[in-house]
Image (cartoon, grey):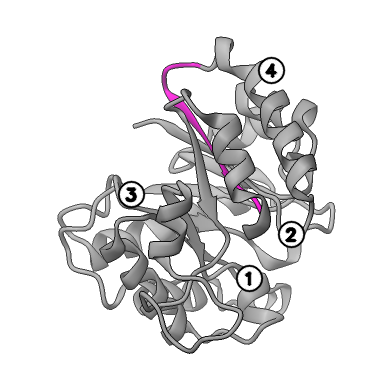
Amino acid sequence: MKKLMAANWKMYKTSAGAEQTARSLVQAVAADLPGDREVMVFPPFTAIASVVEAFAGNENFIVGGQNCYPADEGAFTGEISPRMLLDLGCRSVLTGHSERRHILGESDEFVGKKTAFAVQSGLHTVLCIGETLEQRESGKLAEVLARQLKSGLGELENGVNQEVLSVAYEPVWAIGTGKTAGPPEISEAHGLVREILQDILPNTGAAIRILYGGSVKPGNIGEIISLDNVEGVLVGGASLQADSFSQIVLG
């Protein structure tokens, strides 16, 4: 199973800036990329075409969309469909990122609809889950993860496998704050996620990749990626520069 080294560029970078960063990333890591790793970048929608072009010819460099709507088309102003992402050259999509949940108000049920529709449309889907600091401190970690996974995957069939689905665990309190969950916290959460995945998807849950996200940096990637049940990372701020993200990819 390849480690998935993913970058979420959020609402940063124009088309030209994204292309420059993508080309610099390819130049920095393509020749040295281990055979057990692949790179995935989620640029803003306006920069997808530029990044696809920059990654052309590099099979292990994948472009994804940061979000999608669960319909092929329709009167949904401001939204984008999986079919549109595929048409641009995307092979993946994020669903359920904490900023979509907590800032833009997406419910667990809506995230589940988007996840199922994206998978059924042919996009490798990275379902994001994670708890707030208040939820962790009140002992609700397992409850939150179980609820988000069961809702997020509730409309999928057991045949879903690692080729079409990954899960990214992101403690909300460690996203963009400089705080990082330590190895014990990451191991605990990823162990819980694995147990829940195996319960929901008995045939394939053991093989679904679980990524860690939350202030991942070149300085801590080695420790994080070596933990059990950590099959990759989803990087925010440290992925915006090709130099720092390349160190993470190769770390």
- For badge 4, the amino acid type reads Ala
Total marks drawn? Answer: 4
Q: Give the labeled residue for mark 1.
A: 98
Main secondary structure along the magenta-highlighted residues: strand
Mark nearer the N terminus (1 vs 4): 4
User: Which residue bears the numbered disc 2?
Assistant: 175
Q: Nearer the viewer, mark 4 or mark 3?
A: 4
Residue at image mark 4: 28
Instruction: Tell me whether the residue at label 2 lies in contact with that at label 1, contact meaning CB atoms closer than 8 angstroms.
Output: yes
Q: Residue at x 46, y 33 (%)?
A: 3
In the image, residue 1 lies at what x, y percent? 34, 32
Across and down, in percent, residue 219 comes to 77, 30
Marks 1/4: CA distance? 30 Å
Circle 4 sits in a helix, a strand or a loop, which is it? helix
Q: Amino acid at mark 1?
A: Ser
The one nearer the camera, 193 or 82, is 82
Label 1: few (<14), some or many (≥20) within 10 Å? many
Q: Which residues are magenta?
A: 34-43
- Image spot of residue 142 (x, y percent): 48, 72
Q: Amino acid at mark 3?
A: Ile
Q: Secondary structure at mark 2?
A: loop
- Quadrant of residue 163 within the rendered picture: top left
The residue at the point 42 percent across, 54 percent down is 87
